[in-house]
Amino acid sequence: MGTKSRKIVVTSALPYANGDIHLGHLVEYVQTDFWVRFQKMRGHRCVYVCADDTHGTPIMVRARTEGITPEELIARSYALHTKDFSDFEILFDNYYSTNSEENRAFSESIYQAMQKSGAVTTRKLPQLYCEHDAMFLPDRFVKGVCPKCGAENQYGDSCDACGQTYAAEELKEAHCTICGRAPVMRDSEHLFFELEPFRDFLKAWIPQHTAPDVANKLLEWFNEPLRGWCISRDAPYFGFEIPGHPGKFFYVWVDAPIGYMASLQKWCSNHGESFDAWWQNPEAELYHFIGKDIVRFHCLFWPTMLNVAGIKTPNQVFVHGFLTVNGEKMSKSKGTFVKARTYLDHLNPQDLRFYYACKLNGTTDDLDLNLGDFVNRVNSDLVGKITNLASRGAQMLQKSLGGKAGAMDAEGRALCERAQSRADAVAAYYEARDFGKVMVEVRDLADAANQYFDAQAPWALVKTDPEAARRVMTSILNIFRVLAIYLQPILPAYAAKVSKLFNEPPYVWSDVTKTIEHAAINPYEYLATRVEQAAVDKMIEASRGGPVCPPASAKVPGPVRPATEPVKAATEPVKAATEPVKAAEPVKETIDYDTFAKMDLRAATVVSAELVEGADKLLKLQLDIGEARPRQVFAGIRKAYDPAKLIGRQVVMVANLAPRKMRFGLSEGMILAAGNPDGALFVVSPDAGAVPGATVK
Ligand SMILES: [Zn+2]
Ligand SMILES: [Zn+2]
């Protein structure tokens, strides 16, 4: 306290629009949110901006597969991502999209500065090209036989079987993953941003703006000439076309970090603020929170781009580690690749914030979510130690003493003052992003308060000396109030209920110095409940089943993002999800209307239909029933229908049938078809005019 008000811009890395937010992502957003909320509580002006990263080949290909535009795809992701973030209490000042006019303008002007600097060169690169799909194929769009070990079905950059990396053209029997045809080699001219001319700038910049371990790792690259960075991609590509180079687009990693600027610009426009007063102002501060996998983009290319464009570089890049679950990499087959939404379906978001805070220490160490430890810490520390102070203290005060706080007794006051005296230390831990130490302080103070509470035994005292009991309860509540203030950046909804309990507005840091005596206390609202192991088990089970699988060709990750693990194929025998009704069968037993009404039938538009390799009766359908994304259904209609002719047709779908795991993926419903006695099949369709998702009744 006592520091002058700072102006701070904070960013988290932009999540890619071709996927769901998962618990690994949340390690970053949650810790950035802690830090930002802390700065705001301290009275600083702090703006937290982020955006969806929307460009690149995977977005384009996925949209194409689903039969929608890339803009529709990214709008859908935007809605899902922002809902996940707000449900986890992550509060952005602005959450934008890299596919914005602000971003295009910044990208073009920074590119022009890069060109002017003389560091943009052109080189011809031979690349695999699919003549059928009329596109150059990124590494992950080529599969073939590993040139080193002969394993089949390997990607164009590395072999999963032997771990070797190689160039795509070395792959044997290469084929395009979109159409299956053999690609050809073609020369393409690409733009490179040369880093070598900026060697001295970078060598000085890196140690000043990153932690020593991060800097040391980066500086290893400086033992040899720095390689140029390819900043162009060939059409078709979803992104910004490069001025003066028709058919060439900025590589997604060029305009992604520029998206930080665009999001801040948008916030400034919305709030009548000046962009330069925030970003370019030497008095203002700029911090990026990122994972260690994207360090080179943020600490080599990005500062160099900003530097040539005369734009201020970040004060510091805060790098964190990866999430492991139970000590291992997140795994779909083990059910530990948990999506944000799946977590929210089973558990309370504040518990994850609490647990992550306990484990975060401001370094690049990986963070382990040990599920047993998670249950124990929430139950013993958050519920048992911390919250217990308020629930016992406030409830007893309400029940037996008219809800009125009195004065603290001497011992209680000393404990409260001790808690208050830790404010600067706790603030220093927050500033250093050492949230684990914040939690240790809070837990220690809670332990001391619980000992005092138990020693005073107010539940007995209230019968013999109610005013003495009131003094104990008043002390306990005041100590708890200080702890809640310390916890507010980590548990904002929790702290909001505490301030309500004491009839106060949301806390600022200096509220720590106050005490609440001789005042009425509002009714106690529950603040935290125990986590049940059964709920954790259900979440893991739900993650193992894997909700909707995106279409196979869309699972290809972006060129630089880590691959997500492939969904493990289930082992059940193949069964058609849609089985024709045999006409010759007698009519089944009578059901009442309520039984019929349980069935949720919907008009569905077929957005894609594909053959399923290894199943000669099945078609894989993507069905639009007006939901955020299409449902995948395997239907046994391959004999009767040409997949191409089904696309765009309307069918009737049973929308509430339990999803069924099949060898080829999840089937999330079934479609209705009439089956003649001779086995011929006829898909049931609504008449023209029904919108996708219309109920059939
Ligand atoms: Zn191999
Ligand atoms: Zn192809």
Image (cartoon, rainbow, N blue to C red):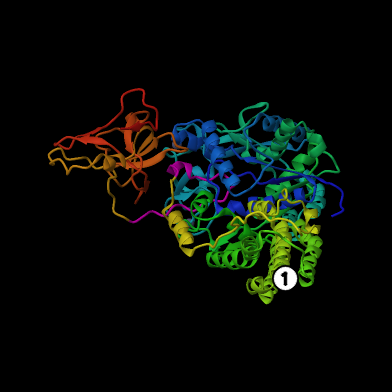
- Residue at the extreme front: 464
Image coordinates of residue 375 in percent, x first then y, are 54, 65
* Residue at the spot 12% in from the left edge and 39% down from the top edge: 584
Nearer the observer, 544 or 295: 544
- On the rendered image, what quadrant is the C terminus found in? top left
Structural crowding at the residue carrying mark 1, measured as other residues with C-alpha within 10 Å and reported as few (<14), some (14–19) or many (≥20):
some
- Residue at the extreme bottom: 455
Residue 649 vertical position relative to residue 22 in the rendered view, above or below: above
Check disc 1 and report the residue beneath it: 468
Going by the numbered disc 1, the residue's amino acid type is Ala
> Can residue 291 be seen at all in this image of the molecule?
no
* Residue at the spot 31% in from the left edge and 24% down from the top edge: 687
- In the rendered image, residue 564 lying in the magenta stretch gets the answer yes
Which picture quadrant has residue 528? bottom right
Q: Which residues are magenta?
A: 550-571
Overall secondary structure of the magenta stretch?
Answer: loop
